Image (cartoon, grey):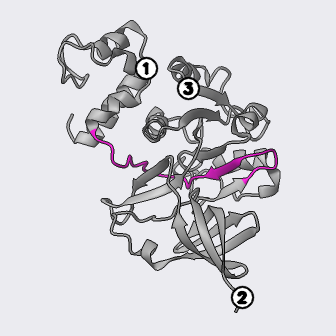
Amino acid sequence: MAESRSLEGRVIRSFGNRFIVQTSAGTFDCGLRGRLRLSEEKTHTPVAVGDRVVIEVDEVPYGVIASVGPRRNKISRPHVEKPDWEQVLIANCDQLIVIASLVKPRLKYGAIDRLLIAAEKAGMKGVVVLNKTDLAESGGCDAPASVYRSVGYTVIPTSAKNGDGLDTLRECVRLKTSLFAGHSGVGKSSLLNALEPGLDLRTRQISVATGKGTHTTTSIQLYHLSFGGYLADMPGLKVIGLWDLVPDELPALYPEFVPHLGQCRFANCVHIGEPDCAIKNAVDAGSIPKPRYEGYLRIRQSLTGKG
């Protein structure tokens, strides 16, 4: 048997306890070394897509992941079957690109906000893509675009069908590692296919009965872009869980709230019903968009279980 060799690489796909690792010598199908599988931490994903790893190769194209490098950031959610366990969706990502459809399915501010909160908590850039402009009425994206641009987010209206915004989106992802995320049916796979036609990712129609999308992507994979960079497509999520987020953290994850924090009458203000609340005053003055504040109230309620 040939002597094993060590290679550095990046996990570009995972399925079960197998991982596809891209290295300078090609891609390898890898398992996990025992000590990684037996981690005592409550995580379903000791190795995740995007991780920088060292593998040991005995026989091409197979290897074993021997070690995992430090993660500069990660996007996680509660594991479906073990809600108190962390499931890391992707690591070492530059930006989270929130895909929302203007129609079919209808735009939901709450879904956008939850993903932007995840990006803020991870310390990565958040971008909002308003997709399916070809189906929307004239001016249909003006209101949501104004909401997110006014608080500092890049907003890109797009259509995979007629090409709206694709050049802008292509430049946005070029030379970066990006994650497409959003509810099922918003057009993530169609946009990725439009950006990189050779991928030929599967897409599905919106359910006529429910008006909602059906799951097409079943696992996260990093795709190398011919014009530079990597792009991953997160599986369509019916529920977007926020991992390890406590209610008191929430206000600081809204960029437009930050300049007003610490200016309320009460130091422990939660910005709901207290008098002289700087956040509510900013909403009344128009410097914090009302849809964003209303979303804050809903998300805080979901975290506390209180009205």
Q: Residues within 10 Å of mark 1 (few under 14, many from 20)?
A: many
Q: Secondary structure at mark 1?
A: loop
Q: Residue at x 44, y 24 (%)?
A: 255
Mark whose residue sits in front, 3 or 2 = 2
Q: Is residue 296 left or right of residue 9?
A: left
Q: Is residue 153 left or right of residue 193?
A: left
Q: Residue at x 75, y 34 (%)?
A: 171
Q: Which residues are magenta?
A: 224-246
Instruction: Residue under label 1, please give it.
Output: 256
Nearer to the camera, 116 or 65: 65
Q: Tell me how far mark 2 sits from mark 1, CA to CA.
A: 59 Å
Was residue 122 drawn as part of the magenta stretch in this picture?
no
Res. 2 mark: 2
The amino acid type, in three-letter code, at marker 1 is Glu
Residue 79 versus residue 135 in the image, above or below: below
Can you see residue 187?
no
Residue 8 location in percent, x, y?
Answer: 65, 64
The amino acid type, in three-letter code, at marker 2 is Ala
